Image (tube, rainbow, N blue to C red):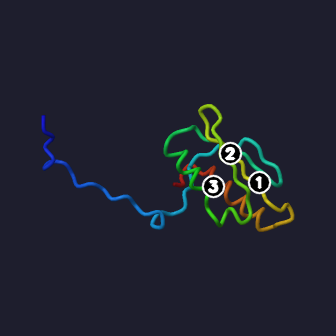
Amino acid sequence: MRIPTHRMPPPTPWEPAAARGPARPPGGRLVRRTDVAAEVRWGAGFATVDAVARLATEQELLRHLALTVTLDGAEVVLVARIKDPADTAGRARLATLLAQLQDPDNG
């Protein structure tokens, strides 16, 4: 059986990474928070795993924070830790990141 290709829409090109904005998965649940570290969790889904993985490779964040992404059962876990506890820019970056990740309307 032939597939009528003349009725199919044209393929959508992949969007280059440079054209996309920074990935911020919405609706993270803050589990633990200290002065220098935090743990945020989401329900695991393909889009969430992709967004958290992209987040963990952002150079601007990696200047001040050590980011670890793991899967724990049906959840994606991001642990963000300030590299230098005396770094005030790192503390500000962590606070901003946590506010963005817990906002259900971002993304």
84 sits to left or right of 43: right
User: Which residue is the extreme one toward the top?
Assistant: 73
Q: Label 1: which residue?
A: 81
Residue visible at 77% across and 68% down in the picture: 89
- Identify which residue, 4 or 74, lies in the foreground: 4
Mark 1 touches mark 3? (CB < 8 Å): no
Task: Name the quadrant of the N terminus.
Answer: top left
Mark toward the start of the polypeptide (2 vs 1): 2
**Residue type marked 2:** Val
Residue located farthest toward the front when viewing the structure as drawn:
1
Please state if 8 lies on the left or on the right of 26 as rendered: left
Give the number of the disc on residue 24: none
Quick one: which residue is furthest to the right in this view?
Answer: 86
| Among the 4 quarters of the image, the one containing residue 30 | top right
Kindly identify the amino acid type of the residue bearing the numbered disc 3.
Ala
Q: Are marks 3 and 2 in contact (CB under 8 Å)?
A: no
Q: Amino acid at mark 1?
A: Arg
Residue 61 rendering spot, x and y as whole percentages: 67, 62
- Closest to the observer, 36 or 46: 46
Q: Nearer the viewer, residue 75 or 105?
A: 75
Residue at point 60%, 56% (across, down):
55
Q: Is residue 97 above or below residue 88?
A: above
